[in-house]
Amino acid sequence: MRKEPKLIIYTKEATLIIGTVLFIIMSTTTFVQVLARYVFKYPIPWTDELARYLFIWSMLLGSAVAVINKAHITITSFRDMVPEAFRSIINGISIFGTLAFSLVLVIEGYKFAIINISNYSPAMRISLSLPMISIPIGGVLMLLFSIRLLYNNFNRNNNPGISRKEVKY
């Protein structure tokens, strides 16, 4: 099995760690909100907003990790019907679809983040570009990982993705 470049491995690991930390903070914030609202009868107005923005970030970072792990749902019935020699072409077409979607996320997400620079969230009073910039960042990560998958797909030593075991600490 071929080794993945350190850039891909470390980017994947950093993305996974950051996404996990954001998800834990989101879960904790939601728990605190429920506790404050229903036990102490004192709702904290900014916790719901923070949890929503952290969910957006963790979802997009997690989607990028799912790209490199090939964890997104795929319909393989057509690919399984073609001869083995043509399967890498079918996989390549699928990866090109992911590349196109990632490019749309980068371009349109950037525009969306720029439009929202002067808009502020109601409770936390932060620029809405902070949660919205997660769209192009997630898109760039998906783009990077998709390019690597495309390389792996058409390389003779077909690598199904990278696993946590390959990372040397």
Image: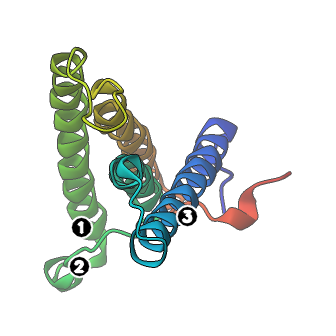
Mark 3: secondary structure:
helix
Residue 1 placement, left or right of 133: right
Q: Which mark is residue 163?
A: none
Q: Determine which residue is flagged by label 3.
A: 28
Q: Determine which residue is flagged by label 1.
A: 86
Q: Gap between marks 2 and 3, in whole Å?
A: 49 Å
Mark 2 crowdedness (10 Å alpha carbons): few <14, some 14-19, many ≥20: few
Residue 86 in sight: yes
Looking at the picture, how far across and down is residue 30, in whole percent?
Answer: 44, 65
Looking at the picture, how far across and down is residue 165, in whole percent?
Answer: 74, 66
Furthest residue in direction front, as rendered: 41
Residue at x 60% of width, y 54% of height? 21
Mark 1 crowdedness (10 Å alpha carbons): few <14, some 14-19, many ≥20: few
Residue at x 44% of width, y 53% of height? 58
Label 1 near label 2: C-beta < 8 Å? yes
**In the depicted structure, whether residue 135 falls above or below residue 165:** above
Mark 2: secondary structure:
loop
Q: Gap between marks 3 and 1, in whole Å?
A: 48 Å
Q: Nearer the viewer, mark 2 or mark 3?
A: 3
Quadrant in the picture for residue 41: bottom left
